[in-house]
Every structure is written in C-alpha cells, then in structure tokens.
Image (cartoon, rainbow, N blue to C red):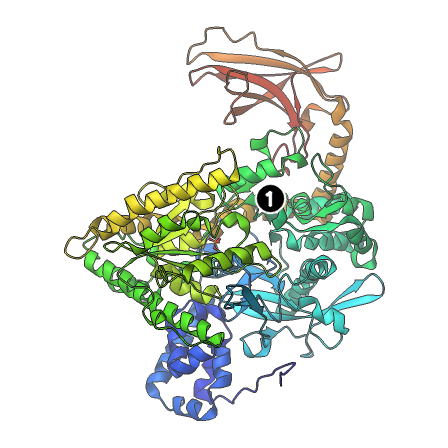
Amino acid sequence: MKAIRTFTVRPVLADALAPLDRLASNWRWSWSRATHALFASMDPDLWREIGENPARMLGALGQRRLDELSHDEDFLARLRAEDARLTAYLEGDRWYQSLEGQKPQRIAYFSPEFGVDGSLPQYSGGLGILAGDHLKSASDLGVPLTGVGLFYHAGYFRQSIGDDGWQRESYPLLDPYGLGLTLLRDEADAPVEIVLDLPGDRRLAARVWIADIGRVPLLLLDSETPSNTEDMRRVTDRLYGGGGEHRLLQELLLGVGGVRALRAWCRLTRHPTPDVYHTNEGHAGFQGLERMSELITHDGLSFDEALAQVRASTVFTTHTPVPAGIDRFPRDLIEAYLRSRLFEGLDTARALALGLEEYPGGDPGVFNMAVLGLHLGQHANGVSVLHGQVSRRMFGALWPGVDENEVPITSITNGVHAPTWVHPALKALSERVFGDAHVPTHDWRDAEAVSDEELWGIRREMKTELVGEARRRLVAAVEGNGNVVPAWIEDALDPEVLTIGFARRVPTYKRLTLMLRDPERLTRILTDPERPVQIVIGGKSHPADDSGKILIQQLVRFSRDPKVRGRIVFLPDYDITLAKTLYPGCDVWLNNPLRPLEACGTSGMKAALNGALNLSIRDGWWDEWFDGENGWAIPTADTASSDEERDDAEASALYDLIEHQLVPKFYEREGGVPREWLRMVRHTMTDLGKKATSDRMVREYVERLYVPAAEHDAALRGDAYAGARELAAYVGRVRGAWSEVRVDSVDGSGIPQQAQAGDTFEVRAGVRLGRLTADDVEVELAYGRTDEDDDIADDHSLHPLSPTGETTDGVTTFGCTLPLDVTGTFGYTVRVVPRHPQLVSPVELGLVTYAS
Ligand SMILES: *Cc1c(COP(=O)(O)O)cnc(C)c1O
C-alpha cells in the first residue's frame, strides 16, 4: 500500500544537543566538511541510508542513540565547536562589507531551479547547480542576496535503466518538513500565504519555505496548501512537469508570487526591500511585470515610468543558445492572463509587446520569455565570452540597426563553488600542506609543498573511491531489475587505468554517443592490453525526449558487450551526489558538444579543481581558458559539409588525442609516477583555480552588474521617482523625434592622405537634430582599421564630437581633434546616438543614425 503523503515526527533533543537543530537547518553543513562529518558520525550507515541529510538524520536516529550522544563528551565538544563556527560564519564581516561606495542593499535572485545538495533535488542540471553555487558564494562573500524559487514536491526524476537499456523515471515525493526547511510565518505564527487571482475566478495560493544557505535565505513557493483546489495544488508538483498552461502557472507563481513572497519576507524579518532583481534565465520574467504593476497602482507611475524603473534595477542572464531551450507561450494564452486582475494597472497590449517576437525571423504569435527578460533587464549577460558573442548575434534582431558587437548583452563566465565541489581528501591535503582547505587559492605547482608522490596518492585515492562507488551502483542497478549480479561487475573498472569521465543531461547537441562513432576503434582503445582506457558515463534524458533516451540506450547496449564491459560503464541517476564522487575520480573530463551550443558548461571546472584534465571541444568556458597546458582541445570541424561529416571528423580527432596524447602521457612513469601528467595537473589546479570559482563569478556580478543596477535604481527612484519620470519623458521624446535626426555632412579634410603617427586629425560634422537639442544626443566618431570592403573592424574606437556652437539652417556643427596614435589603414564614420546618464549602453534604445 502506498502512502499518499508522509510526515515526520521529530524526537525531543536534550538541551546539550539543541545546537544540532540549528546546524541541521542551515545548508552550510553541505559544504562544511566538519559539520558534514559530525552528522555522519552519529550513525554512518544510517547516514548513507537516509540520503545524507541532517534533518532527516535527526528524524531517523531514535531516542536511544540521541540519549547516548547527549552524554558523549567528545561528541558534545565537537558539536559546540561546529555551532560556534556557524555563528562566526553568519555574523562576521566578509568581502562585501569591505566594498567601498554605493552598493545594493539587497539583491533578489530568481531561478526556476536550485541545486544546493543531493538531498534537495530541486534542479535538473547545470542551470540549477549554477544557481545553488551562486547562493553559496554570495553567502561566503557576505553579499546580501535572497534566492527565490519554487518547491517541487517530486523534484527532478530519479533515473533507472531497464534490461532493454531504456531510461525509466520515478518521482519520489519529498517531505519539506523533514529536510531542513522552515515555513515563513506571520506575526500570529500562521504560515504566510501568497495569493494570485487568476482569470476565470481561479485562485492560486502558495506557502513559502525558507532554506537557509549559509547567510543567504532561499524562498521556495509551494502550492501544496489546504486553501488551494486540487488542480492548483499540482502547480508545484514537479520540476518542468507539464508543458503549456501548467508551465505558465509555475512561472507566474515564480515571478509574480516570488515578488509577493519577497515583500512578505522583508516585512516580517525587517530586511530592506531589494533594489536589484536578478533573473537566472527567462522563467521568472513575470517578476518585472508584477513590479511594474505595483509601481503603477501604488506609486502612480505611468507604464513607461514603471518600465524605466524596473529596467534600471533588473539583471537578466541568458543561458542558452539553443532556441528549444527558451520558454515560448502562445500569445493568446498570455494575453488572457495579462488582461486579468493579476496584472492590475498594466496596459495589456503594451505588456504583451514586451515579450512578442515582433522582429524579422520571429513569430509574432509567440510570447518569448527571453525577449521579455531582455526588454525588462537593462543589464544583461551571457555566461562565457563565446556565449556573449553568440547571444549578441542571436538576439541582435531586438536592436535593429545596431552593430552586433554593440548589442547590449555582456558576459560573465560561470564558476563553481569550490567548498562544495572539491573532494574532502584533497581539502585535507590542502589543509595539511598549505594551512587551509581552500584548494583553488594555492600554488599547486610548488613541489616543495606537495610532492608528486603525495599528489598522485590523493588522485589514486579519489579514483579508488569512484571505482568502489561505480561497482556498488552497478550492482544495485542489476538487483533493482530483479537480476542476478554477474561476476564481471565485481571487478568492473580499475583504479590503475586511465579514466575518462563524461556525464551530463542528454540533449542532442551534447552528443553523448560521439565516442561510439567508430565502435571498433573505441574498443581497441578500451581494451589495449598494455595501456587501456576506461570510460565512466552518466546522464539523464528529459522524460519527454525519446531521442535522448535512444542515445542512452545505444551507450548502455555498447557497454554490455562482453568485449568491453567493465571498461566502459553507464552509471544511472546522475545527480549531485554521484557528481561529487565522479569528477574527482576521473583523470580526464570529456566534453564534446556541437560548438557553439554549450553556453558555458561547468562540470569540467569541477573536475579541474580536483586535478582532472579537460578534453573538450572549444566551446563555452573551454574556448576561453584552454591554454595548451591544462588539457586538450578537440578541433571543431564546423566547416564540414554535413552533420555526419562533422561528427566523423570530430570523433576521429577525439580518438587521435586519446591514443597519441593522453595515453602516452598517462602511462609514462618515473618512479611509478607520471611526472609530465602531474605537471599538467598542478598547472590546471593552480591556474583554473583562480578563474573557475563561483567566488570570482559572484564578485564580477556584484561589481559589473549589481552595483550599477543599484545606482541606476536609486537615481530613478529618488525624490518620488523624479528620475524615472524624467528618463521616461526623455525616451518618449527621443523616440518620437528620432526619424528627424540625420548626419548632413562630414568634413574630414583635416586629415592628410599620408598621415604619420603623432599627427592630429580634425573632423567636423553637420547634424540635423529636428526637435532634439545638442544635449539630447552624442555625436561620435567611429574609427578603426578597415578591411577590403571598407568595413570598420569590430574593435574600433568611439570618440565624442562636441558642439562648436554653430547652427545654420537647422544644421548643428560638432567637431573634434584626435591624435593618430596607431598605424595602419583606417576608416571612420560619424554617428548619432541618444545621450542620457541613465542609459547603460548608448544603443540600448535601438536608436542610432550613421552618416551615409
Ligand atoms: C555541474 C553539473 C551539471 C552541469 O554540467 P555541464 O558541464 O554544464 O553539463 C549537471 N549535472 C550535475 C549533477 C552537475 O553537478
């Protein structure tokens, strides 16, 4: 008989054990080695069995064991020490507190998924794990950030693989009470309820769970509340559950409900309301419309003024160059919601236009959440340098007439939370030799501090752990299908063999099966009698994606072939827990997406921090940081005439690299240790350690996006929104008059045909401004190297021209003098763009006029 709900009865904790409750309800335990170890030590077998979660542990332990522990002086001493450490962590000043100048009072961070820990499966892959790492680093750095998401009762699915190699999904229910979450309660101690009035007299209510991620609260909205009808309770049933309206209701709850939950949380906990709103991908886009509706109905702003205010304070991060990865809804569906009471005060047609694909190549019958995100976020970014470029091209149509490289989308490369992802054995080594456990900050090239033997010893230890874990999982999978465990599984994999890891979600572009392109060649590589290679694979396909499941099936079938079994294994149910053993246990981390579809990728960073070398297509972060010493780049065959040919060429290059580079280097030993290999490992850990962490990433978000957003927000909000009113009036005026702006003449006669470096260069331009004034615009000289078509290079310079004071017949003269400080063939032109101190980019309004 299956229970439809479960609940937890917690034992009473003796006073001496009271700090356990506090430690269990702050998720810092998940990246604090000592707190983690403290809970595990209470009963190591049970700890594993209940899925390594302190709150669950307290529920499962039983009164007798708790009584024992309450008299165990050694345990109590460790408990008090951990409790004191948590207090110090929560209270002390950190990096953010030492930042000078104006800074955000609070940042709201919205994401549809958060990957915080294996026991809180509220994520499907990279996007969610990144969000979890963002919160953890914000906490470590003292950034005043609050996360906003949904609580999914089933989370993401658990994967098993049938005898036929086909993926099966199951959705175990989570019990929020037993996990280490607390409900947001009001002054009367009743759970706060957030309510959304939906069209058709429907009502969607939600409670708010709080997960404390160190210093950062994460608010998770949950529609499982008695005041909801049965169908409304199902809104947060599972992550990315249904399509269409179910998905839309989730996103309305996240965006609109999220803002309301934040307001309630700020009021009840006496925190200042956020001045910066960051949306991780487009799913939370409705947060901006909710805030506009507030500004219009409560503060009396117009649509345009509210838009200006919301844009100023919003940071939008786009995460995918794959159009199928973007949420798109039928226009009519969205229109019905926009028309309803849910978005009070908003002009329906104008709000709708913010998300419609009304540009060449778009579908105006579609409401696109990325388009909404870009319209509502004055500060936007992609997640690696290459992805920034790809995004500027992909979304360039939203800024017609603007050069691609000027499309206002910058980039901040992702990073990973080292305390979460570095293996405990490596942390312990770091502590022993460098004095602290923070692996990425040290110089691992220092052979005096760490010998080759010591480093290799740790690498072997982590690999041996992976081999053990893989065997356990393979056995469990076979038993789970009701079969007898075959003998070969008992010694599948070998810690002495060169180990390549590959695990990720399985959308087509990630090419799970590229390695199977030439099965004979792969078989030879795996089974070489002297210098074999082994591959450990994991990956989940989206439940609705049969093409991904076919790829998994192909791989599983190949791995069961008696010729190769035990040398290539597929481990089911890839998740954070498996990832933490997998990355450190591999010598090489493989990634072979179709360039440039991997926006960033982070698994390779986690592997690198643990001393694995990367073997990857130059896509995402690897395009930026591959340096020839930290791994290998698989050449991209993007000029191939077909997909087939491209896969053949890239697979062949992959085999070549394994055979001719990886294998010789790995098996070349001196005193039993691969010296050259370790040189690359040391370099990887040292150099990528500096770059690949989410501490670096969050600092960049603060300095490059959050601080400017807070400044813009304050400038517009002050004095009863005088700035927002003024900016909206300016934008309206400039838009209305822009068609009158023309560059009438450009006089560059000051430039000699044969210029010499050091000469100066004089330009005058006559500009028709129509109804605008010289103060409304910037007239700019754009100059730089030219190609054979006289196109000016992307890295050109811009130099402002100033009004000379002359205006004749409606033509205003602007001029400048410029020293020629570089040599070569140059070209120049003159352009006019809007000028206002509250524009982040001069072309963000899509208004730019060039001389012709
Ligand atoms: C890091 C991580 C991912 C994302 O990895 P990519 O390289 O971006 O594909 C996915 N799943 C899990 C469990 C992870 O830990």
Q: Secondary structure at mark 1?
A: strand
Residue 97, x across and y down, in percent = 47, 56
In the rendered structure, the answer to whether residue 553 lies left or right of residue 150 reads left
Please state which of residues 494 and 142 is positioned toward the viewer in this rendering.
494
Q: Quadrant of the C terminus?
A: top right
**Going by the picture, which residue comes out furthest to the left?**
671
Q: Is residue 570 above or below residue 726?
A: below
Q: Quadrant of residue 736?
A: top right
Lateral position of residue 195 relative to residue 755, left or right:
right
Q: Which residue occupies the foreground of this view, 129 or 475?
A: 475
In this orientation, which residue lies closer to the viewer: 361 or 263? 361
Where does the image place residue 653, in percent across and percent down from the top left? 38, 41
Identify residue type, mark 1. His
* The quadrant where residue 815 appears: top right
Q: Is residue 576 visible?
A: yes
Residue visible at 29% across and 48% down in the picture: 662
Q: Residue at x 67, y 65 (%)?
A: 261
Q: Is mark 1 within 8 Å of ligand 1?
A: no
Q: Is residue 300 left or right of residue 65?
A: right
Which x, y percent locates residue 415?
45, 52
Label 1 crowd (10 A; few <14 / some 14-19 / many >=20): many
Q: Quadrant of the N terminus?
A: bottom right
Q: Nearer the viewer, residue 102 or 150?
A: 150
User: Who's the residue at 39% across and 88% down the image?
Assistant: 69
Residue 618 appears in the figure: no
Q: Residue furthest right?
A: 200
Residue designated by label 1: 379
Relative image position of residue 502 (x, y in whole percent):
42, 55
